[in-house]
């Protein structure tokens, strides 16, 4: 009795009761066609991400991140200025309160 198996690499294994194994390479055109189709789809997706002569998604994402970083730095500076102004006003109010003796 012979057992036939076909693995993912399109290899046929023939085994019989004497425990001899024979390896035969089989040309699997369907498997090759499927791999080529998947490679084509992968190439298309990579071109879409990187940009095939045009700004791709990665370039657009990098530009948006740079814009957000600039906005965050600008907002941080404004926040510090506002906090400093509030601190100065509170300190002045406390000093005037103590200086004028208002209770």
Image (cartoon, rainbow, N blue to C red):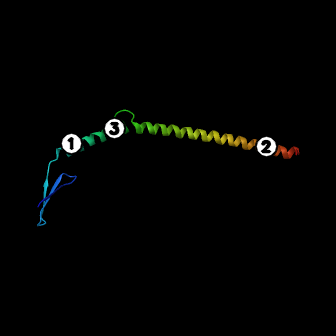
Give the image location of residue 67, x and y in percent: 51, 37
Q: Is residue 76 above or below residue 4?
A: above
State the image coordinates of residue 90 (x, y, percent, origin top left): 76, 43
Give the residue at x 57% y 41%. 73
Residue 22 falls left or right of residue 98: left
Q: Nearer the viewer, mark 1 or mark 3?
A: 1
Tell me if mark 1 has few (under 14), some (14-19) or many (20+) residues whose alpha carbon lies within 10 angstroms of its own. Answer: few
Q: Which residue has dot 2 on it?
A: 92
Q: CA distance from mark 2 to mark 1?
A: 79 Å
Single out the residue that lies furthest toward the bottom: 18
Kindly identify the residue that appears in the image at 63 percent across and 39 percent down: 78
According to the picture, the residue beneath numbered tag 3 turns out to be 47
Q: Secondary structure at mark 1?
A: helix
Is label 2 or label 1 in front?
1
State the CA–CA distance, disc 2 to disc 3. Answer: 61 Å
Q: Quarter holding the N terminus?
A: bottom left
To which quarter of the image does residue 17 belong?
A: bottom left
Which circle's residue, 2 or 1, is located before the other in the chain? 1
Q: Position of residue 38 (x, y in %)?
A: 27, 42
Instruction: Give the SS element for disc 3.
Output: helix
Q: Quadrant of residue 76?
A: top right
Q: Is residue 70 above or below residue 12?
A: above
Q: Residue 17 or 88: which is nearer the viewer?
A: 17
Look at mark 1 in the image and give the residue it sits on. 33
Residue 15 placement: quadrant? bottom left
Side of 59 where 96 appears, left or right: right
Chain-order first, disc 2 or disc 3: 3
Left or right, 25 with respect to 75, comes to: left
């Amino acid at each position: 009795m012979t057992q036939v198996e076909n693995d993912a690499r399109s290899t046929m294994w023939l085994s019989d009761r004497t425990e001899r194994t024979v390896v035969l390479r089989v040309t699997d055109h369907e498997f090759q066609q499927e791999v080529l189709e998947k490679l084509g789809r992968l190439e298309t997706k990579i071109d879409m991400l990187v940009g095939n002569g045009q700004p791709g998604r990665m370039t657009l994402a990098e530009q948006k991140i740079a814009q957000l970083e600039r906005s965050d730095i600008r907002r941080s500076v404004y926040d510090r200025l506002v906090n400093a102004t509030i601190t100065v006003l509170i300190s002045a109010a406390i000093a005037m309160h103590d200086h004028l003796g208002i209770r």
